[in-house]
Image (cartoon, grey):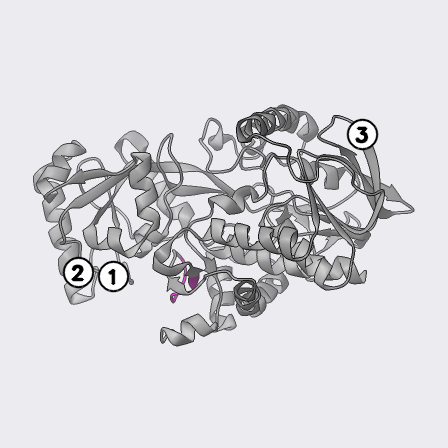
Amino acid sequence: MKNLSRIIAVSIAAAAILGMVLVSCAGGTPRGDSGFASEYDVIIIGAGGAGLSAAVSAKQAGASVVVFEKMAMVGGNTLRATGGINAAGTSFQAKAGITDSPDLFYADTMKGGYEKNDPALVRVLAEKSASSIDWLTKMGADLSDVGRLAGASVNRAHRPTGGAKVGPEIASTLDNEVEKVLGISVYKRTEVTDLIVKNGAVTGVSVTASNGKNYQVNGKAVVLATGGFGANNEMAASLVPSLRGFATTNQPGATGDGIVMAEKIGAALVDMAEIQTHPTYAPDKEMITEAVRGNGAILVNKKGSRFIDELKTRDVVSAAILDQDGKSAYLVFDDSVRKSLKAIEDYVKLGAVIEGATPEALAAAINADPVTLTATLNTYNQAVASKNDSQFGRSDLPRALSTAPYYAIEVLPAVHHTMGGVKIDTETRVISTAGKPIPGFYAAGEVTGGVHGGNRLGGNALADIVTFGRIAGNSAAKGL
C-alpha cells in the first residue's frame, strides 16, 4: 500500500469536482445541505447500497443516525448494478419451482472465489440472503423475477419483473425508506476526511461540508460504507500493473478513500490485489449485464466464432476475450432474448446494439464472416436442442437463437469490482492489524475484503452490501 494516500488524492479531487458539476446540472439545493448535529448514535460514511442498508437497520434498532455522502447523489455503484441480487431459499424461487439452499449458495461462492474467501463471512452471506430479499420486499422492492448469473448452480439472481435493472430498484427503495419513511438525514457533497480515535476507539469523524467548512461530528459508532477503488486506475494498477489504462464500470466516487482512512488508524486490509474485471463492457457506453448471457446470448470473436462457455466466471471470460483479435468480442442474441430482458432496451437507447434481419446481415454489420457466424448460430442451436454443448460445455442453455431480428453488442473487459479492503468479522466489526476489533468501528460493502475471495460471482455484490449493511447498522446501534 506504498504511497496509497498520494495515489488516491487526484481521484478524490476529480470525484469532488464531478459531484459539483452534477449538482449544478440538477439544480436546486441538495437535501441536508447544512445543519447536522454535533453528535449521533451512529454515523454512516457513504450512501450507496451498504450505507443506506446500514442506516435503515440502525434506525430500526432505535439509534439516531446520520449519513454523509461525498458525491452529489445517493446510490453509489448500486445504481449501476443490473443483473440481480443473489439469494437462496426465497419465496420467489419456491414459486418458480427452483430448488436452492444456503449450502449450495455457500459452495458456489467459495468455488467462484477460488476458496480464498473468508468461510465465516460467506456462510453469513448465504444464510441471511433470503431474509435480505424479504427485508427489501417489505419496503416495496420488486425482486420477483429470478434468473441465473455466471458461477451459480441454479437460478438465484433476483431482479424486477421482466428482468429490469435491479440496482436502481434497490437504491430507490432504500433511499425512500431512509428519507421519507424513517426521516434519516443524508448530507450529500459532504466528505468525511478523517476518523477520530480516542483511547483506541473510533468516536467520530472530521467532515468537510458542502459549504466548504470543516466540522467534527461525534458518534457512539461509525459505519464505513464508502465502496471500493474501481474508479481509481492508478491505485488499481499499483496493485495489479496489467490493469493500467483499463476502463472502469464504476461510478467516479469509487476512489478508495475509505480504505485509506481505515488503514491510517490501524485497520487490517485483506485481498487488496484481488481486482475483478467485468467481461462485457460496451466501450464508451456502459456495462452490459451478465443477465444477457444468462438469458441465452453467446460470445463470438470478430470472425464470428464462439470461443468460451459464456457462463464461466468473470475472470475466465475476461481473459478469453483478451485472447481474441482486437481484445474484444461481440455478444450475439436474437429477438427472444431481447424480449426476455427489459435491461436490453436501455442498451438499444444508448446506441450500443447492432441489428441485422438475418445472421448474414448481422455478420455484415459487425464485419464478421457471414458463413462463420451462421454456422456458429446453427451449432449453438443444435446444442440447445440436444441439451449438450459439446464445444464448450455450457450447462445452462435457456433458448435457441433463431428468432429474427438478430443483435450484437461489442464488448471488452473493464475494471469492475475490488474484492479487497478492510478486514471485518461476522458482526462487521473492523479488525485491527493486531487482530482485534477496533471499538466503535464497523464496515460493510465493497470497502471490505474477505467475502468474495479471488473472484466475485455476479449477483453477490448486492447480496453482500444489503446483508452486511443490515448487520453493520444493527451491530453499530447495539454496540456489539
Residue 177 in sight: yes
The residue stretch that appears in magenta: 151-157
Percent position of residue 120, x then y:
63, 64
The residue carrying mark 2 is 383
Percent position of residue 218, x then y:
85, 44
Q: Upstream in the sequence, badge 1 or badge 3?
A: 3
Is there a contact, CB below 8 Å, between mark 1 and mark 2? yes
Q: Amino acid at mark 2?
A: Ala
Dot 2, how many residues are within 10 Å of its Cα: few (below 14), some (14-19), or many (20+)? some
Alpha carbon distance from label 2 to label 3: 63 Å
**Horizontal arrangement in the rendering, residue 143 relative to residue 435 (left or right):** left
Residue located farthest toward the front when viewing the structure as drawn: 28
- Residue 283: which quarter of the image? top left
The residue carrying mark 1 is 397
Percent position of residue 239, x then y:
57, 34
Q: Is residue 155 magenta?
A: yes
Quadrant (top left, top right, bottom left, bottom right) of the N terminus: top right
Q: Upstream in the sequence, badge 2 or badge 3?
A: 3
Q: Amino acid at mark 1?
A: Leu
Q: Is residue 178 magenta?
A: no
Query: Which label sits on residue 214?
Result: 3
**224 or 138, which is in the foreground?**
138
Is there a contact, CB below 8 Å, between mark 1 and mark 3? no
Element at label 1: loop
Residue drawn at the location 58% of the way across and 34% of the way down = 253
